Amino acid sequence: KTTTVKKETKQTTASKKKNSTVNSKNADKKTTTVKKETKQTTKEQKNNLDTNNEEKNNIEKSTNKTKKSYTQTESNTSANEKENKSQTKDVESEITNQKTTVEEKSANKNAETIINIFKSDGSFKTIEVIGLVIITCVVSLILGSLVTSGFKNSENKFVEDEYLNKIIETYEYIKQNYYGDIDNEKMIKATIEAMIGTLNDPYSTFFDESSAKNFNITLNGNYQGLGVEISNNAEGNIQVMKVFNNSPAKNAGMQVGDVIASVNNISYLGKTTSEFVSVVRDGLETDFTVVVQRDGEQISLNIKKDNIVIESVHSKIFKDNNKKIGYIDVDIFASNTFEQFKNKLEELEKENIDALILDLRDNTGGHLSAAKDMLSLFLDSKHVIYQTETKNKIEKFYSKGKQTKKYKIVVLGNSLSASASEIVIAALKDEYGAKFVGGSTFGKGTVQELHELPTGEQYKFTTKRWLTPKGDWINGHGITPDYVLYPSEAYIENPIESNDNILKKALELLR
């Protein structure tokens, strides 16, 4: 049948070249016949699609039960969407609720097959991330064209797409003729990953299920676990690098430097951190007996898994030259970062601080909405905080704040301060008059859109670039500080507060 289609297509082309309208019409009829033969699965489907509008409506109602749903990971998304209904997803991590429907279920057998591979009800989540710097389409075309577009045009007919058809036809041919077994899920994952790879963009990435889970934990700011950060030490054993306050691990007596010897009587010496995490975080068990090695002794700890809230904001007050200078360190812009930041800032302002140091060193970004809300605490609504540029337009985004603060601000940053951090630095520098101390920032001036597949994998790709309030694109070169300063040798060797020459410079500027 494939050979016949090709022959008829060639004959049609020859007829067009040789003859006139009559032959062209004949060719069109042949092409139409071929398309009908390809699309129809049964005679009944053909009749239903051609003549029975009632059946079409039934199909549409049946399939419209599937809706694209999103996991709300930001506290401010709904407010942004109410105020900007006409805007597309311009915010790094704002979750935009969209409806996607799989319509014309029986209109094309091949298209339906692709969707069934994912065992999908048509739902996957979309987030715009300006994102963590992870330097590491189009079943994006398949999902974008088939699912988002609903497989149809305004006349309720399947939209022909030359490139999409190549993918579908190749899949169908391999499925029908390959002599061995086919792993459909694996094939589609590989297709998506390959498509993303062709974009040649360091920020367009495919995440397998495990990587996606880790990515989401970082951005969400909470997870189920023990409340520790771990790493493999020089001996290849799992060592505790950090114990979170008020966590199950902290309450059980676990300490920084402990080596994990066993979990529930199974030795973990020489195992990887991934093996440990797969049990204590991702596994179904909730109660653990963890034996740790400490100072030559083995200590047994009973720990129950619980919800862990990652503290991404830390604060304190420096009393310098009869002034109270507030200090806030932000590790990442997670979905819960803004609330933590707001609480810390309110605590400092109750102490009547005279100035503020905002430390964004090593902050690689995250949710732009957290950064935007943070800026709204300092700037009133007259101030532009960033702009976005697509292929067609430049759009300005303003602060939602009611008033502009009066005290002086110094922002600290370095080469690992990226994306959302750079938006905060640029806005405070351009619009507030804050001084920037440290090293030039990373220079990430693009925005990515994140899609989650029903099977747990995710992919993100660049959809636009962002500009500073003054319209500068910092991609590749970053933001230059007002006072260029790099860590001293003393601080590099022993990174404690008394050796922090960059912090000392900030305090000096605010005296």
Image (cartoon, rainbow, N blue to C red):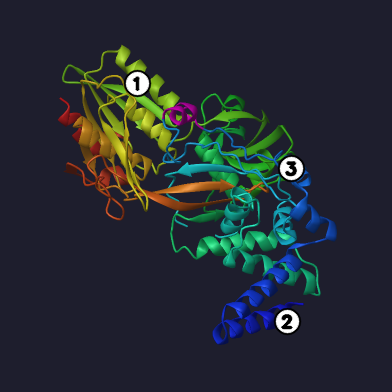
Given residues 388 and 148, the one toward you in this image is: 148
Q: Is residue 386 magenta?
A: no
Give, as a single range, the part of the protein colored magenta: 74-83
Contact between marks 2 and 1 (CB within 8 A): the answer is no
Numbered badge on residue 448: none
Horizontal and vertical percent position of residue 90: 41, 41
Q: CA distance from mark 2 to mark 3?
A: 36 Å
The residue to which callout 2 is attached is 3
Tell whether 259 sits left or right of 106: left
Horizontal and vertical percent position of residue 393: 34, 47
Contact between marks 3 and 1 (CB within 8 A): the answer is no
Identified by mark 1, the residue type is Leu
Residue depicted at 29% across the width and 47% down the height: 441
Residue 500: quarter of image: top left
SS at mark 1?
A: helix
Horizontal and vertical percent position of residue 356: 26, 25
Foreground mark, 2 or 3, reads 3
